[in-house]
Amino acid sequence: MTDRSQLLSALADVVGGRYVLTSNEDVAPYATDWKRSSTGVPACVVRPASTSEVAGVVRHCRELGFTIVPQGGNSGLAAGAIPDSSAGQVVLSLNRMRAIRSLDPVGMTIEVEAGAILQTVRENASEVGRMLPIAIAAEGSATIGGVIATNAGGLNVLRYGMTRDLTLGLEVVLADGSVASGLRHLRKDNAGYDWKQWFIGSEGTLGIVTAAVMRLVTVPRHSVTTLLSVTNLDAAISLFELTQQDIGEALSAFELISAQSIDLIERYAQLKSPIAAGEWFILLEATSSLSGLRDAAEAVLAAGFEIGWVVDGVVAESDMQARQIWALREHVTEAEARRGSSLKHDISVPLTRMGAFLADAEAALETVAPGAGLNLFGHLGDGNLHYNVLLEPDHDQQAINRVVHDVVVKHGGSISAEHGLGQYRVDEWLRVAPDADLRLASTLKTALDPDGLLNPGKILPSKLSHSKAIGETI
Ligand SMILES: Cc1cc2nc3c(=O)[nH]c(=O)nc-3n(C[C@H](O)[C@H](O)[C@H](O)COP(=O)(O)OP(=O)(O)OC[C@H]3O[C@@H](n4cnc5c(N)ncnc54)[C@H](O)[C@@H]3O)c2cc1C
């Protein structure tokens, strides 16, 4: 019996034969990422139905020398859930573990299995007037486990924080096959290390999340949505400062869209901006249980006009108009994809450095890709910009990545604000990360997964090259 046939038979004993997928047709959807830019060849895809089955799968893979790639909804943007092409990695899909275990509207918590779809969890919460404020366009595919493993951000980070801020408890299967149970429904718990934090944003490299307790918030009764165009980036940042002062905690989104992005949307997504262009557009949304938001938004708009920051603006009169404004923001990526290929940089810099970053990045880009088109948009309130370069056939992608990331680092920023490192950004992270970050990452990985069983090659290089790369870098 070969190692692989031994593995298939052992996994079938744990989960049942029909949940061990091996044919090319069956494994195909699990082997290519959402962007269709990375395809692997797994030993098989296994679909356990419970935490104990996940633990059984981990133990067999360990014994037989196969590594594991955890996968949720496969909507990640860094190919973190895709195996390599060695046929030696098992894709462990959580997509049969979708139960909503409990919902507490008073304590405002929800306990769910890792494979639960984000949209379903949000719908369950909204049925009792509560909300899980993780708003990402992939909510129909992304799972709670994936959202936690990538520490997903999205449109409401400004108001409610990242997934990390909304996770109260975790259940995790560790690399030795044991289960760490920490499904606490507590907002305060300072008894020892907060170990769940080690797994949030760890992209499946430290443990397999099997269930979670998430914090809910109340559904705001009132909202206002505004689209503005502004003269320049300084005006956008000044307006953000004013909005924070005057609308404060009700501010739930402050999105930046460049005039080039609006141009792409109008050309490739057949949508039209309802206002005259400035250098930048701002989508501002405020939500609250209390009324009076519209007056507050109009006052900010009027002040912006008077000072000369705002070129044009509209406050949505209805839900439908609000949706039309949001549609502009939501179609930026699609319009970019329809134009052709692009090189994405999901970066963040301190807000006060954003202007200097953009000027330096433009100058640096000119040295390697003169005249390159850009699609710039993002969550300005979080200092998070999608710095996407519209590719032409003669562009050197590695050179572009390097110059953009060097400028990010110069301004104290991050080369991955939301999407993680997956397999796409490993080399660049090794190149620019501070020594202390690499040393601590390596220490944690070695402590929790000494044999490199879990998602090798993601975040850190795979085990074979691991010690060499880290040794050389540190
Ligand atoms: C259209 C679109 C819009 C998006 N918008 C945003 C956005 O605004 N903000 C944002 O942050 N992201 C965004 N994303 C990225 C993506 O949706 C998130 O990263 C999401 O959290 C991934 O969830 P998933 O279940 O699909 O995870 P997968 O893609 O399956 O996996 C992602 C990573 O998590 C690991 N993983 C998955 N499940 C588990 C588990 N149970 N235990 C341990 N590790 C696990 C995988 O190994 C992989 O490394 C977007 C993606 C798309 C396609």
Image (spheres, helix red, strand yellow):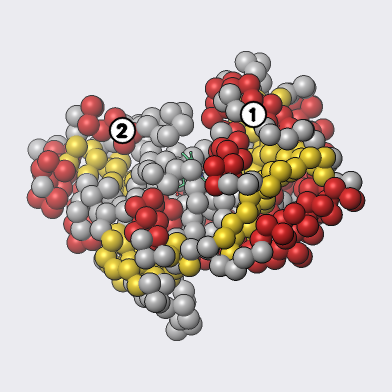
Residue beneath the point at 71% across and 29% down:
260
Task: Name the spot of residue 253 as percent of width and height, x first.
Answer: 63, 53
Which residue is more in the foreground, 257 or 97? 257
According to the picture, the residue beneath numbered tag 2 turns out to be 29
Within 10 angstroms of label 1, few (less than 14), some, or many (20 or more) residues? some
- Relative to 24, say whether 435 is above or below: below
Tell which circle, 1 or 2, labels the residue nearer the N-terminal end: 2
Where does residue 117 sit, x and y in percent of width and height? Answer: 34, 50
Residue with the mark numbered 1: 272
Q: Nearer the viewer, mark 1 or mark 2?
A: 1
Q: Quadrant of the C terminus?
A: bottom right
Per the image, label 2 sits on a secondary structure element best described as: helix
Name the quadrant containing residue 157.
bottom right
* Residue type at the position of mark 1: Lys
Dot 1 and dot 2 residues touching (CB under 8 Å): no
Instruction: Look at label 2 and name its amino acid.
Output: Pro
